[in-house]
Amino acid sequence: LGGLTRDDVVIRLERARIAYGEMRSVHGFRDHPQLAARDRWRAIDSPVGPLPALLPPVNIAGVTPRLGPVPRLGEHTAAILAELGYDEATIVDLRDDHVI
């Protein structure tokens, strides 16, 4: 297809009703008009303020996706270590020794 512009190729593909995908930059993905038209973006809280978050690609009837806030650094460390079997004294020692 030498000599054809991107727009020329897209027009030909669309006229022929051939499915295609475009490689996009992060900004191109974020700003894609279909994601806005389908209301796929939500704002979530984070330690640095609100951030855009994309809903999961599949909708399940009767299920609302849970998009919680981004945790602070280390916010869940003690709970995860406890779940892995570390006792509270060991977790305190790890924190005091600056391991966590």
Image (cartoon, rainbow, N blue to C red):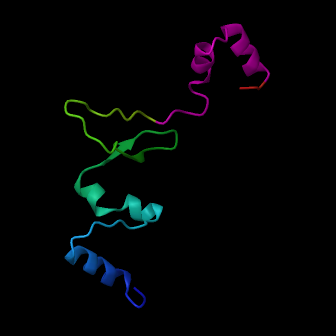
At 27% from the left and 75% from the top, the residue drawn is 13
Tell whether 53 sits left or right of 14.
right
Between 24 and 36, the one nearer to me in the picture: 24
Question: Start and end of the magenta stretch?
Answer: 70-97
At 43% from the left and 39% from the top, the residue drawn is 45
The picture places residue 37, in percent across and down from the top left corner, at 23, 57
At 27% from the left and 56% from the top, the residue drawn is 36
The part of the image, by quadrant, that contains residue 93 is top right
The part of the image, by quadrant, that contains residue 42 is top left
Q: How many marks?
A: 0
The question of residue 82 being in magenta is answered with yes
At 56% from the left and 24% from the top, the residue drawn is 76
The picture places residue 25, in percent across and down from the top left corner, at 46, 65
Between 9 and 85, the one nearer to me in the picture: 9
The question of residue 41 being in magenta is answered with no
Relative to 19, residue 61 above or below: above
- The quarter of the rendered structure image containing the C terminus is top right
Tell whether 36 sits left or right of 86.
left
The picture places residue 4, in percent across and down from the top left corner, at 37, 88
The part of the image, by quadrant, that contains residue 98 is top right
Q: Residue furthest right?
A: 97
Tell whether 55 sits left or right of 71.
left
- The quarter of the rendered structure image containing the N terminus is bottom left
Between 8 and 75, the one nearer to me in the picture: 8
Between 4 and 47, the one nearer to me in the picture: 4
